[in-house]
Amino acid sequence: MALNPDLKIDEQSLITSTLIKKHKAASAETVDVVELKARTAQLALVLDLAHQAFARQEPAGQIVERLAGRLHELRREVAPALWQELIPLAQQHRVATYLKQDPFTRWSFEKPRGYSGDATLLDIYYKHPSANEIVASSSELGREIFAYTSEAASSVAGRERREILARTVDETAARVENAEVLAIACGHLREAELSRALAEKRLKRWIGLDQDPISVGTVNRDLAGTVVEAVDGSVRGLLRRAYPLGTFDLVYASGLYDYLPLPVGARLLQRAMELVKPDGEFLFANFSDEITTDGYMETFMDWPLILRSASDMWDIINAAVDKNHVDAEVYYGSNRNIVYGKIRKRGDLGAPA
C-alpha cells in the first residue's frame, strides 16, 4: 500500500510497471503459444532450482547471481511480448519469499511511495545512513542477499552516477562564478552531500525539481541552510513551462530518462536546453542495455526500465537539438552499466519562458 497520498503521477515518465505495459501495449507483437509453453517450463526450472538452493542454505549471493544470470539470458532470448507474459509467472513463484527478504528487492517490489525507483530505493543501494534501519531490520538471509544485490554492477554504477553528478556540479562551479544548477527529478539530491562547491559556498543556487512531495520535503529538511531548494514539479509541468525557473549553468536529469520514451525524452531535452545559459551544459544519464540484472529487476523487483545504448542516447540528442548550436558527447560509466549524454550550449536555442 502506497504511503504517499499526495503524489500525483503525470504519466509522461513511465514510473510504474503498469505505465510501462500500457506503453508497450501499442506494439502489435503477438506471442507464439507453443514457445510460451516451452519458455514457461524453462522459467519454472530456473526458479525451482533457485528455491531448492535456498532450502539447502547455499550461499545466498551465489544463488541470486546464478538466478539473475539465467533470467538475463532468458529475457535476451525471447521476444519482448513473450517476456512480458513470463514476468508475472516469476513474481508468483514461491522463491520470491526468499528474495523479498532482501530490503532492496522488497522495497522495489512493494513500492511504498507508489512508483518505481523512488529516492529511498536509491538511498538503499547508495548505502546511505538514512536507509540503515531498513537494512538492519531485515532478516539475516535478507542482509546476505543485500550484500550481493547492493554490489551488483548496476548498483555500483548507480553509486558512481552520484559521484559523477557531484563532480559535474563542482566542475561547473570551477568554470563559472556563482554557478546556478537545476536537478530535474532530483529525488533526495544525495549528490549534494558529495559536492565540494556546495560545502565551500561557491554556488549561487541549486534547485531540485521533483513530483514526489516526500522527496521535496526531505531535500529541504536535510539541506536547510544551504543554497539548495527543492520545489514541486513534474516533466509535464516543465514541458508546459509552468515554473518560473530562470536559467542555469548546469541542468541535469540523473535517473529520469530510464522512464522516458524517446519522444518525451527529446522534448524534455529541448526544454532543458532553453533553461541552459550560453556555454552551460545539460547532462542526462540512462541505465544501459548492457546491464545483466535486467531480468531480475523486471521480475522480482518489479522495476522495468527503458534501457539504452550509446546509439539510443544519440537518437534523443539528434531529435532534440541543432548541432550547429551545441557540442555533444555520449560516454559510458566505468563499468558500462550507465550511459551519459552531455550537451554544451554554444549558441542561443531560444529564450527561456
Image (spheres, rainbow, N blue to C red):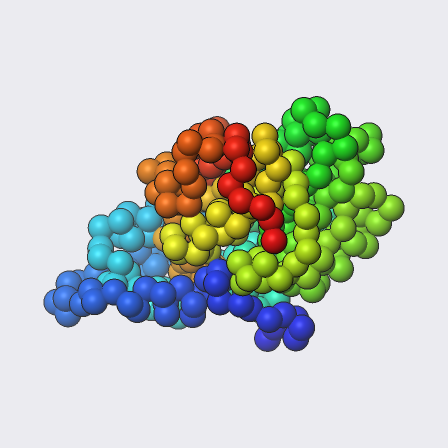
Q: Which residue: 47% across, 36% down?
A: 341
Left-right relation of 7 to 45:
right
Report whether residue 148 is seen: no
Q: How many marks?
A: 0
Q: Position of residue 4 (x, y in %)?
A: 66, 71
Q: Position of residue 186 (x, y in %)?
A: 64, 51
Q: Is residue 181 above or below residue 268?
A: above
Residue in front for this viewpoint, 293 or 219: 219
Q: Position of residue 161 (x, y in %)?
A: 56, 38
Q: Residue furthest left?
A: 34
Q: Which residue: 15% across, 70% down?
A: 33
Report whether residue 280 is seen: yes
Residue in front for this viewpoint, 200 or 115: 200
Q: Which residue: 61% across, 66% down?
A: 113
Q: Is residue 206 above or below residue 200?
A: below
Q: Which quadrant does the N terminus fall into? A: bottom right
Left-right relation of 261 to 119:
left
